[in-house]
Image (cartoon, rainbow, N blue to C red):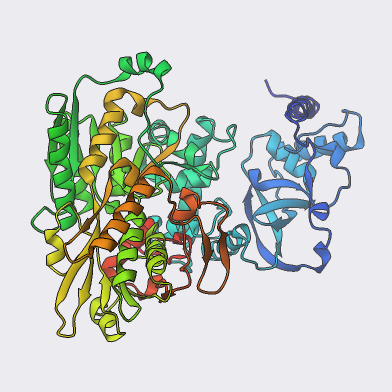
């Protein structure tokens, strides 16, 4: 039965009264936002006149002036009685909307930070919202905020560039760098102007995705559809947004829902710095969760003959098998060298019964996430640091503790006070290792200078350091507990004599076997599966867990060896925290006054170098092409990276 315009108004009024009561009960403002109150100096701000276009209704959040906002709810539903002038005008617009001509005139909105405030046409917005319209034609005046380093402002100016290319208001990221990731996922170049067909297609696909997002309760949970879309595009190709049925799209997003919820957390990663022992009261409950047998899959890039990194993890797998000969069966899968090969090996591991799968380099994370969505009952872990995913946990070692010890040894052995340091990549955790090494060197030699070079840049880093005068050099770490690697001259900290001969001293060492043993023990105890809510877990263990050691050769003098071993014992017990001291950066800024230790997050995301280091963290554009994929995954400032297909 067709309702009269009066009945439509009464129905809209009822909607408004319900919304007002609900928002009031939640302690939220039931009225539309007012731009003039948000921006008292609005008249002094720069304004751009934009062309008329259809804008998303859900981006309309308020009015420009206070005027008669008491007539409307925050969602633009009416509140005044049916005999009011407002109601009569609303009904007249309703009648025009239902006629053959419809409501064709554009409203006038001011846009600020991607949200719209109505100057003219609030009743038209109300009528069309009541009838479920999702878009409305609008003339737009954009208010430009002053450019600052504030992340929200930076993200907005990235949106301005995005809108210039796409004409879309459908995507509103809150953090810088997200539009770059979106362009990469869409295989588009930033600044490339989209065709009208591309714009319509993108708008339609965003609408389909938003429908699935809201059907899963995303709006009610105050999650952000844009963040969910970016995560979804890490698993599925963009074109599938146009081919999936509504049901299939909802199911695909449902498989990522815990990860979507985690992304909404301001600090999503929960860092576990030591293996957790089950509390006595939980033991009975955990026993019921613990698997009787566990099938473990180890996924490697390359193989042991090619990669020393893989060799370390393979030895860790052998240790794991020996530690649990009756409870655990370990299968190894090599040459996950492309995303396609990785997915094939992950499928094979699951088909062969894997309950727990370790992917052993950060570059395998994308494929691991896809497999985790495909096989939700399998536990997946990726060897990386700080990954903000619930379905894939990450694990790594606090290598900076070993670097602190080898720094002490280097400082004591550097006769000319110059120590070379070869760093790997500008990624999470690496500056902490450089700085810890420097702190250790200056503990035994206050005059020490650490000369920094990078293996991810053009040229031979060791030759550069020798040319700069370094006669003690710290190179890459020993990949497994075998001091023989230091004799090769490519690992650890070593002396260089005048003839260029290398004499190995010491190196941090990854004890992957102990790490895998500890992780599997948490699964066998049942504690691994104890989650109160979706969370991203990063296991970041150190010397106190037995997963980092320092190998020393006989060339380390007895007194220095004794000191190093004593300091290692103090680190293991927590009596020595390398960064609980005054920390001064290269530019003289005090980063820590010495009254506290740095948090795990501060250490992982450390993006500065301390005084005593002579060198700099390289920019993305300076890196060798082969180094860029890892930096895109785990870089210190991924929000500043350019889009790259």
Up-down relation of residue 87 to residue 613 (above or below): above
Q: Residue at 27% x, 86% y: name it.
A: 467
Q: Position of residue 353 (x, y in %)?
A: 17, 28
Q: Residue furthest right?
A: 84
Q: Say if residue 610 shows up in the picture.
A: yes
Q: Quadrant of the C terminus?
A: bottom left
Q: Residue furthest left?
A: 305
Q: Nearer the viewer, residue 21 or 58?
A: 21
Q: Nearer the viewer, residue 202 or 604?
A: 604
Up-down relation of residue 580 to residue 540 (above or below): below
Q: Residue at 53% x, 59% y: name it.
A: 176
Is 477 positioned to the left or the right of 451 in the image?
A: left
> Quadrant of residue 282 in the image?
top left
Up-down relation of residue 350 to residue 616 (above or below): above
Q: Position of residue 81 (x, y in %)?
A: 88, 28
Q: Position of residue 434 (x, y in %)?
A: 38, 65
Q: Nearer the viewer, residue 198 or 381?
A: 381
> Quadrant of residue 51 in the image?
bottom right
Q: Residue at 48% x, 39% y: name it.
A: 262
Q: Nearer the viewer, residue 324 or 301?
A: 324
Q: Say if residue 377 shows up in the picture.
A: no
All told, the count of numbered labels is 0
Is 130 positioned to the left or the right of 538 in the image?
A: right
């Amino acid at each position: 039965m067709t309702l009269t315009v009066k009945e439509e108004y009464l129905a809209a009024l009822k909607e408004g009264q319900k919304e007002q009561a609900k928002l009031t009960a939640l302690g939220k403002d039931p009225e539309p936002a007012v731009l003039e109150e948000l921006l008292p100096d609005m008249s002094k701000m720069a304004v751009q006149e934009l062309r008329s276009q259809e804008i998303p209704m859900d981006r309309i959040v308020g009015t420009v002036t206070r005027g008669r906002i008491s007539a409307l709810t925050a969602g633009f539903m009416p509140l005044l009685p049916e005999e009011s002038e407002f109601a009569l005008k609303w009904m007249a617009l309703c009648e025009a909307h239902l006629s053959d001509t419809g409501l064709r005139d554009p409203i006038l909105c001011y846009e600020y930070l991607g949200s719209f405030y109505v100057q003219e046409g609030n009743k038209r917005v109300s009528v069309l919202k009541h009838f479920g319209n999702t878009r409305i034609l609008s003339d737009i005046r954009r208010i430009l905020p002053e450019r600052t380093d504030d992340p929200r402002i930076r993200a907005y100016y990235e949106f301005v560039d995005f809108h210039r290319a796409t004409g879309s208001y459908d995507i509103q990221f809150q953090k810088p760098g997200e539009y770059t990731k979106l362009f990469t996922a869409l295989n588009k170049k930033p600044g490339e102007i989209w065709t009208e067909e591309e714009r319509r297609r993108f708008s339609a696909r965003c609408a389909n995705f938003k429908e699935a997002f809201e059907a899963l309760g995303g709006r009610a949970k105050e999650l952000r559809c844009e963040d969910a879309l970016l995560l979804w595009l890490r698993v599925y190709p963009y074109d599938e947004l146009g081919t999936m049925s509504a049901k299939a799209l909802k199911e695909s997003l449902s498989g990522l829902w815990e990860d979507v919820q985690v992304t909404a957390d301001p600090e999503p990663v929960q860092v576990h710095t030591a293996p957790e022992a089950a509390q006595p009261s939980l033991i009975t409950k955990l026993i019921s969760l613990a698997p009787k047998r566990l099938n473990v899959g180890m996924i490697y890039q390359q193989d042991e003959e090619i990669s020393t990194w893989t060799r370390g993890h393979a030895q860790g797998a052998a240790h794991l098998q020996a530690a649990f000969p009756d409870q655990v069966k370990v299968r190894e899968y090599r040459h996950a060298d492309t995303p396609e090969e990785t997915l094939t090996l992950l499928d094979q591991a699951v088909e062969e019964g894997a309950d727990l799968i370790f992917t052993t380099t950060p570059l395998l994370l994308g494929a691991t996430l896809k497999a985790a969505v495909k096989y939700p009952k399998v536990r997946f872990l990726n060897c990386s640091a700080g990954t903000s995913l619930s379905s894939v946990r990450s694990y790594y070692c606090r290598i900076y503790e070993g670097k602190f010890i080898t720094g002490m040894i280097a400082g004591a052995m550097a006769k000319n006070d110059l120590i070379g340091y070869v760093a790997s990549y500008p990624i999470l955790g690496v500056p902490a290792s450089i700085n810890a090494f420097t702190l250790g060197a200056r503990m035994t030699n206050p005059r020490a200078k650490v000369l920094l070079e990078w293996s991810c840049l053009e040229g031979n880093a060791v030759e550069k350091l020798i040319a700069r005068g370094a006669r003690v050099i710290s190179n890459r770490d020993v990949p497994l507990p075998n001091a023989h690697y230091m004799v090769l001259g490519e690992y650890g900290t070593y002396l260089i004599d005048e003839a260029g001969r290398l004499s190995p001293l010491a190196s941090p060492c990854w004890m992957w076997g102990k790490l895998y043993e500890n992780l599997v023990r948490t699964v066998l105890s049942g504690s691994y599966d104890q989650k109160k809510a979706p969370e991203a877990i990063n296991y970041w263990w150190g010397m106190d867990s037995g997963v980092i050691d320092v190998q020393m050769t006989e060339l380390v003098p007895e007194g220095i060896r004794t000191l190093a071993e004593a300091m290692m014992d103090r680190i293991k017990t927590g009596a020595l925290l390398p960064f609980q001291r005054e920390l001064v950066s290269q530019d003289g800024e005090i980063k820590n006054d010495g009254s506290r230790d740095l948090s795990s997050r501060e250490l992982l995301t450390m993006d500065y170098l301390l005084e005593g280091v002579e060198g700099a963290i390289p920019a993305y554009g300076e890196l060798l092409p082969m180094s860029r994929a890892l930096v895109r995954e785990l870089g210190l400032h991924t929000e500043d990276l350019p889009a790259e297909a």
